[in-house]
Image (spheres, grey):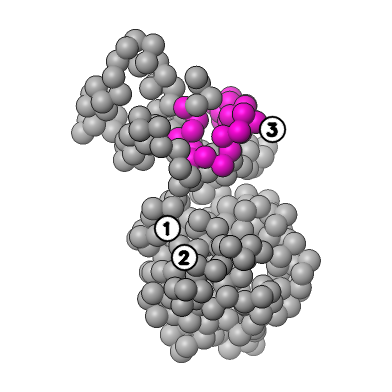
Amino acid sequence: MAVPMSVEAGAPVAVIGAGIMGSAMARNLVAAGFTTRVWDRSASATAPLADAGVVVEATAREAVADAAVVITMLSTADVLDAVMFDSGTVDAFADGAVWAQMGTIGVPATLRTRDRLAATRPAVRFVDAPVSGSKGPAEQGQLLILASGPHAAAKPLRPIFDVLGRRTVWLGEAGRGSQMKVVVNAYMSILIEGVAETMALADRFDIGHEELADAIEGGPLDAPIADAKLHKMDRGDFAPEFPLEWALKDIDLAIDSAGDDVPPLLAALSRQWHTAVAAGHGREDISAALLALR
């Protein structure tokens, strides 16, 4: 039986993927005193992390070697497969390590990843732990972590998750975290599209955006993320915190997970956002949903 490894005993943490979320995680971990390694296929993404004290590795295999915890924050299931399995990265995991898969890849892909790892590296514990939150919460260590997997993995992950998030919810066996994530992101996306369409309707009635905000704020219809995106849209600030193309990916993952009985509002939202991404707004913030209505 593999001996569990511990970051508290000085074993490194590896972060695979240094985009908006992964880079924020790596910065917070090294600032908290953890030996932190990172790999990303883009050198421009990892160079600033080296200045912050993160060890930048040339390959993902080198990053995970001897790491007690490996965090993956990659964009899609195909990228995850290519980096972790096709390139042999899982073969470099230490026995007793914990793999925290924190990117959003959907339920079927999560279960395939769990089963593929179990077949090839049974001594590595797999935790499905997608997060709710965007750039700001990631940088502030205020993510909501939706964790699922073996109970034995909770203890070695606790000090890591305490740095990365404001709260960790354990939901049962691996896959339950990804189920909750697609549900939570569906809710969030519907809210933000609602804000965009409400603002477009207000414009037609010549109702000012601040008037609209004043009518909603502090009442039963108020929601923090809706309020934040309303003001972001009002400023015309579409700098990416959570890019629209990522939000669309999550909506399509929710639709794929729903089977034959696709929720009609999500189906309509997917069509609307595919149009927005095709118009060139995919790399902009999710608040750029407003631009597709103009």
Residue 148 visible in rendering: no
> What residue is shown with label 3?
260
Badges 1 and 2: C-beta atoms under 8 Å apart?
yes
Q: Nearer the viewer, residue 108 or 196?
A: 196
Mark 1 to mark 3: distance in Å? 34 Å
Q: Nearer the viewer, residue 198 or 43?
A: 43
Pinpoint residue 225: horizontal percent, then vertical percent: 36, 40
Give the residues in magenta. 262-290
Badges 2 and 3: C-beta atoms under 8 Å apart?
no
Mark nearer the viewer, 2 or 3: 2
Badges 1 and 3: C-beta atoms under 8 Å apart?
no
Q: Nearer the viewer, residue 255 or 149?
A: 255
Pinpoint residue 124: horizontal percent, then vertical percent: 64, 77
Taking the image as shown, residue 148 lies to the left or right of residue 79, namely left
Mark nearer the viewer, 1 or 3: 1
Taking the image as shown, residue 196 lies to the left or right of residue 172, namely left
Does the stretch in magenta take in 133? Answer: no
* Disc on the earlier residue, 2 or 3: 2
Report the quarter where the N terminus lies: bottom right
- Type of secondary structure dominating the magenta stretch: helix
Pinpoint residue 243: horizontal percent, then vertical percent: 52, 43
Which mark, by number, is residue 138?
Answer: 1
Q: How many marks?
A: 3
> What residue is shown with label 2?
25
